[in-house]
Structure formats: structure tokens, C-alpha cells
Image (cartoon, helix red, strand yellow):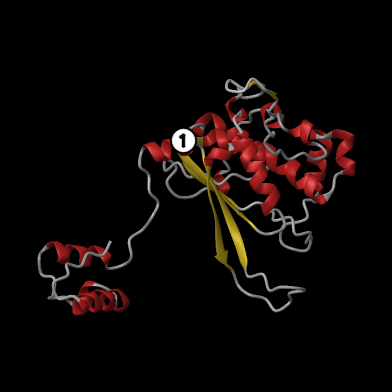
């Protein structure tokens, strides 16, 4: 078939003259009750002044370290004039929205503070929100503000579990842009014996860059060499390929190097 040469969006094929229409599928979006009320809410939140509580202060006053107490949305708006475009790394641990209201903090997004904020930000619609609607309403303006803090090569790390991982990723794609997703890390947590179906022993860290293209352009690499690798590499560069010292590397790494040398006496071993 030659109609692949028709103009994008539709038109007559340049080879056979047959008219074809092509429709581009829209990107998936996430919608929920109350979304229209919160997408611009971070801009409506007034700026606030921070007041120093000397009774709870300590350490070097000029060090720049701050512990801010209050609604995190208000705190972010108060800090924004000082730190906009200046933060390279942000880590947040939001409510996982498990439905548990008996923890030290309410993890059902149903605390009196959240309900009061929803009534103010969303209005009457807020009374009909599901647990997930409330969580999305709470997260959106805070993520939008956090993005404004990041440097061009900055990144944000968000801890989450299976309750909201799917919605969080789509929400992050909307706020930060799909091309800026870096990874979803999986880490093992403590195991429990109270599983109903499967023993879920993992959680996630969702990672997005402010501008992934900047990280690529600058050749940024986030990795750490294995312990002892630098010493072995330096030993290799010195030309003493067979005089390996056990003090140069941990046992497992040294065993790998020695094994390679034994298998090929002429081999030059580099570990990086």
C-alpha cells in the first residue's frame, strides 16, 4: 500500500491519488472530581512570611537550614520567593492513601485539615469526592509548586506504594511532562505475615527530572563505583597485572579479578 505517503492528518496520496484521513490518538490524561478547581490553585495561594520561633531554634543562624511547621502548601508558597529555580534535589514522602486513620498521621486523606482545605479549594464538589479524588486534589497543587523550585538539571524523588502508584505516574507526566520521567525504583521493605493474597514486600520511588534533556546534554550519570574498584583500576594502570594485593579490594571483587587472571595469563584486567 502506498497511501502512507499521504500528508499527516489526511489528504490525497502523492503516489495513487487516493484520499485518506488519519487521526492521531490523544495522549492519555487523568481526570477526577475536583480537578478543575485545583489545577491553578497553587497560583491562587497567597504568599506568606516566615516567622522565626527562637524558642525552637538552634545551631548556626546563618547556615540556611529551616524547619517549617504548617500546611505544606502554605510553607512552599512562603519559601518560593527565596528558592525558586535553586533546588537541585527534592524528596517527598506523601500520604500513601492506604485508608489507615490510626497512624501518627492520617493516611486516609480525610483529616480535618484536608477536609477544610478541600471545602475551600474545591467547594461543594469536595463533599462527594472519593478517597482517590481527595488524594489527587491534595497532590496536584503541591507538585506544581515543587516543580518551580527545581533547577534546570534538578530532579524530584517521590516515595509511594501500590495504592497510588498508577495515578501518581500519570499525574507526574501531566505536571512535569512525559519526556522528563527518569525511572520508577523498586525497593524491598520489611515483610509482614498478614497478607490477604500476596506478601507485598516492596514500595516505589518515582523519579522525574525538571528537564531530562539538560541532564542528557550535560552527560549527567548517577552511579557509584563498587567499593575497591578504584584501587584495582589504579593497580591495573600501574602495569602490575598479576601482583594483586588483598588489601586493594573486598574479597568478592578480588576473587573475580584473580579468577580472570588465572584463566588468561596475558589478560589485562580493568574493573570499573
Instruction: Establish if 249 lies above or below 221.
Output: below
Q: Is residue 51 something one can see in this rendering?
A: no
Please tell me in which quadrant of the rendered image residue 62 appears: top left
Taking the spot 32% from the left edge, 77% from the top edge, the residue there is: 252
Count of all numbered marks drawn on residues in the image: 1
Instruction: Establish if 83 lies above or below 156.
Output: above
Whether residue 193 sits left or right of residue 177 in the image: it is: right
Whole-percent x, y for residue 206 in the image: 57, 51
- Frontmost residue, 197 versus 164: 197
Taking the spot 60% from the left edge, 33% from the top edge, the residue there is: 78
Circle 1 Cα neighbour tier, 10 Å, few/some/many (<14 / 14–19 / ≥20): some
Whether residue 177 sits left or right of residue 126 in the image: it is: left
Taking the spot 78% from the left edge, 31% from the top edge, the residue there is: 36
Which quarter of the rendering shows the C terminus? bottom left
Circle 1 SS class: strand
- Frontmost residue, 36 versus 60: 36
Residue at numbered disc 1: 151
Which quarter of the rendering shows the N terminus? top right
Taking the spot 33% from the left edge, 65% from the top edge, the residue there is: 226
Whole-percent x, y for residue 197 in the image: 75, 73
- Frontmost residue, 245 versus 3: 3
Whole-percent x, y for residue 65 in the image: 47, 45
Q: Is residue 140 something one can see in this rendering?
A: yes
Instruction: Establish if 86 lies above or below 12.
Output: below
Give the residue furthest to the front: 16
Whether residue 84 sits left or right of residue 269 in the image: it is: right
Whole-percent x, y for residue 184 in the image: 56, 54
Amino acid at each position: 500500500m502506498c497511501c502512507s505517503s499521504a500528508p499527516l492528518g489526511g489528504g490525497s496520496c502523492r503516489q495513487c491519488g487516493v484520499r485518506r484521513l488519519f487521526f492521531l490518538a490523544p495522549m492519555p490524561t487523568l481526570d477526577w472530581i475536583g480537578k478543575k478547581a485545583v489545577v491553578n490553585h497553587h497560583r491562587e495561594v497567597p504568599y506568606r512570611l516566615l516567622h522565626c520561633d527562637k524558642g525552637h531554634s538552634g545551631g548556626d543562624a546563618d547556615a540556611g537550614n529551616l524547619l517549617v511547621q504548617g500546611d505544606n502548601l502554605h510553607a512552599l508558597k512562603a519559601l518560593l520567593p527565596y528558592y525558586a529555580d535553586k533546588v537541585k534535589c527534592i524528596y517527598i514522602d506523601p500520604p500513601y492513601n492506604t485508608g489507615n486513620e490510626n497512624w501518627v498521621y492520617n493516611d486516609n486523606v480525610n483529616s480535618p485539615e484536608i477536609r477544610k482545605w478541600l471545602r475551600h479549594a474545591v467547594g461543594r464538589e469536595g463533599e462527594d469526592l472519593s478517597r482517590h479524588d481527595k488524594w489527587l486534589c491534595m497532590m496536584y497543587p503541591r507538585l506544581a509548586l515543587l516543580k518551580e523550585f527545581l533547577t534546570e538539571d534538578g530532579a524530584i524523588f517521590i516515595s509511594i506504594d501500590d495504592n497510588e502508584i498508577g495515578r501518581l505516574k500519570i499525574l507526574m507526566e501531566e505536571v512535569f511532562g512525559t519526556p522528563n520521567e527518569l525511572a520508577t525504583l523498586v525497593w524491598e521493605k520489611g515483610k509482614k505475615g498478614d497478607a490477604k493474597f500476596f506478601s507485598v514486600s516492596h514500595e516505589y520511588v518515582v523519579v522525574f527530572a525538571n528537564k531530562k534533556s539538560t541532564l542528557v546534554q550535560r552527560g549527567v550519570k548517577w552511579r557509584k563505583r563498587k567499593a575497591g574498584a578504584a584501587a584495582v583500576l589504579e593497580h591495573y594502570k600501574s602495569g602490575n597485572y598479576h601482583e594483586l594485593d588483598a588489601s586493594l579490594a573486598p574479597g568478592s571483587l578480588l576473587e573475580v579479578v584473580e579468577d580472570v587472571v588465572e584463566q588468561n595469563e596475558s589478560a589485562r584486567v580493568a574493573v570499573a
